[in-house]
Amino acid sequence: MKKYTLLLLLFPSLIFAQDFTIVDNVTRSAYKNVKSVMSLAERIDYDFKTDEEKVRAIFIWLTYNMTYKYNPSTLLESPEFLVYYTEDHLNQIIKYKKERKMLKSFEERLAICEGFALIFKRACDLMGIKNELVYGFTKPSGYKVGAIPKAKNHVWNAVKVNGKWMMIDATYGTGQVFNNVWMRDFNEDFFNAKREMLRRTHFPSDYKWRRFLNQKNLADFCYDPIIKNAFFKHDIAVVEPKGGIIKLDKKGPIKLKIKGIKNTNSLLYAFGGDRFAKSPATYERTNFSEFHLQKPKENSRLLIFLDNELVMEYLVKVD
């Protein structure tokens, strides 16, 4: 621990240049066995100087030490019946339940998104960093494209650093679900996530945060294709189809038009239930690449891969 603290003193310019290498290395190596959120916050607060370094350390700790408890349900948790006498009593019950959930998540190192977000919030609170929980919606599967959610199914964090709000989603930063299996897949893009990225994947229920992201309305968000982490890594743009539901008739293949693909041979596709991905017929146009995909026999998810990474999902409906 002293070794890393000395490095911080000798080379502060590494931190101020927003190179988080030292913060990440210290957090991954020195905090693995902390016994409580308070202990974690105290060590982070002691070892790092700026709020940006501190919230980065919380994010790294969560992504390195926590495991996502995957549940196919579209809700954060099952509804429960609460008995209360006054509004204050209800708030006390909710606060107690969140506290128990946060403590259990930390102790087991296992949680759904709310556990990740509650640990993050508590650590920020203990260090005096202004923050809020952001509740809202994400689309977990291509089969959900076009479906308007009836209840919130995700929560993440907003923190105020240097007078400006940033959004952080440690759950998405830790891994992702593919074919109903959660896989650890660190993605630092969800630390201080770019708004243009987050508005494609997250829909806040609070209008304040929708305005912050310049988010479209819920129906349009739900109708969009599902965008995965690798989509932004490959820096591509979809020309067609814009909507997430592809309706087919009896004529012709599915046509996919994409800008920015450097190696068209790297694009593969599969439908839900397929054991192997396939190569489409490829045609180079003036400003984009056009791919022709064989149609499925029935309604299905359409999964698009680049360099063996899932980048998008559509819902295909066969007439």
Image (cartoon, grey):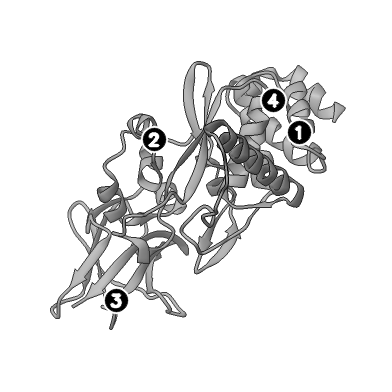
Cα distance in 3D space between marks 1 and 4: 10 Å
**What's the mark number on residue 40?**
1
In percent of the image, x 82 and y 22: which residue is there? 6
Amino acid at pointer 1: Leu
Image side of residue 37 versus residue 219, left or right: right
Quadrant in which the N terminus is drawn: top right
Q: Which residue is mark 4?
A: 126
Q: Which residue is mark 2?
A: 206
Q: Nearer the viewer, mark 2 or mark 1?
A: 2
Q: Mark 3 or mark 1, which is nearer the start of the sequence?
A: 1
Question: Outermost residue toward the right?
Answer: 2
In percent of the image, x 20 and y 51: which residue is there? 287
Q: Mark 3 or mark 4, which is nearer the start of the sequence?
A: 4
Cβ atoms under marks 2 and 1 closer than 8 Å: no
State the image coordinates of residue 266 (x, y, percent, origin top left). Answer: 40, 64
Amino acid at pointer 3: Asn
Image side of residue 20 versus residue 132, left or right: right
**What's the mark number on residue 78?**
none
On the question of residue 104 being in view, the answer is: yes
Cα distance in 3D space between marks 1 and 3: 48 Å
Q: Mark 1 or mark 2, which is nearer the start of the sequence?
A: 1
**Mark 1 nearby-residue class (10 Å; few <14, some 14–19, many ≥20):** many
Q: Nearer the viewer, mark 4 or mark 3?
A: 4
Question: Outermost residue toward the front?
Answer: 85
State the image coordinates of residue 233 (x, y, percent, origin top left). Answer: 44, 48
Residue 56's place in the image compared with 140, above or below, is above
Q: Mark 4 or mark 1, which is nearer the start of the sequence?
A: 1
**What's the mark number on residue 299?**
3
